[in-house]
Image: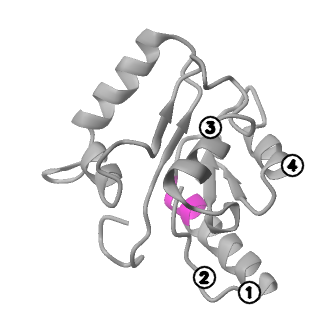
């Protein structure tokens, strides 16, 4: 996304960090982690969504441990991105968030990343998204939001 090869794609975070401290650590890490020299994850996430509404982090109300019931509806409504325009990557090895999101947020394409995001999983997610978009007859084969 940072390389400009994916058009107007925007990114979001749906994290179920389990304590307020974990939330603060996650946000601080995004401010430090550089995806390219001089470009932090936070900088990248702010593109097209400067007010932070695309960062749904934690389990404190109105969020919960079930991203499909809280994080995703909030992202859809706050960012104006339909589920059919979303591609979700999840690294959880203790809960099947991808299964829950696919079941409860129809249209979201999911990709598990049990060892963290790897390039092949990114590409596989994009392929799955393009295939779903083609099946629906959508005009775009790139995710536009979360």
| Mark with earlier residue (4, 1) | 4
Res. 27 mark: none
CB under 8 Å between callouts 2 and 1?
yes
> Is most of the magenta stretch helix, strand or loop?
helix
| Mark with earlier residue (4, 3) | 3
The residue pinned by badge 1 equals: 134
The residue pinned by badge 2 equals: 141
Asked whether, in this view, residue 26 is left or right of residue 141, the answer is left
Q: Residues within 10 Å of mark 1 (few under 14, many from 20)?
A: few
Q: Residues within 10 Å of mark 3 (few under 14, many from 20)?
A: many
Residue drawn at the location 56% of the way across and 69% of the way down: 123
Q: Which residues are magenta?
A: 118-122
| Mark with earlier residue (4, 2) | 4
Residue 98, by quadrant, is top right
Residue drawn at the location 57% of the way across and 63% of the way down: 120
Q: Is residue 96 magenta?
A: no
In the structure shown, which secondary structural element does the residue marked by tag 1 occupy? helix
Question: Which mark is nearer the camera, 4 or 3?
Answer: 3
CB under 8 Å between callouts 1 and 3?
no
x then y, percent, for residue 68 = 73, 40
Q: CA distance from mark 2 to mark 1?
A: 7 Å
Q: Nearer the viewer, residue 143 or 124?
A: 143
Placement of 33 over or under 62, stated as above or below = below
Q: Where is the N terminus found, in terms of image quarters?
A: bottom left
x then y, percent, for residue 17 = 54, 22
The residue pinned by badge 3 equals: 71
Q: Residues within 10 Å of mark 2 (few under 14, many from 20)?
A: some
| Mark with earlier residue (2, 1) | 1
Q: Nearer the viewer, residue 66 or 35?
A: 66
In the structure shown, which secondary structural element does the residue marked by tag 4 occupy? helix
The residue pinned by badge 4 equals: 103
Residue drawn at the location 59% of the way across and 40% of the way down: 115
């Amino acid at each position: 996304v940072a390389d400009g090869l994916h058009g107007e794609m925007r990114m979001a975070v749906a994290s179920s960090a389990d304590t307020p401290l974990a939330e603060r650590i996650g946000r601080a890490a995004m401010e430090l982690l550089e995806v390219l020299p001089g470009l932090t994850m936070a900088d990248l996430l702010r593109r097209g969504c400067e007010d932070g509404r695309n960062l749904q982090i934690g389990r404190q109300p109105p969020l919960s441990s079930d991203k499909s019931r809280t994080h995703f509806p909030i992202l859809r409504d706050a960012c104006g991105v339909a589920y059919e325009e979303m591609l979700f990557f999840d690294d959880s090895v203790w809960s099947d968030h991808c299964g829950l999101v696919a079941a409860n947020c129809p249209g979201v394409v999911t990709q598990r990343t049990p060892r963290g995001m790897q390039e092949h999983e990114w590409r596989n997610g994009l392929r799955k998204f393009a295939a779903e978009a083609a099946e629906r007859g959508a005009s775009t084969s790139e995710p536009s939001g979360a």
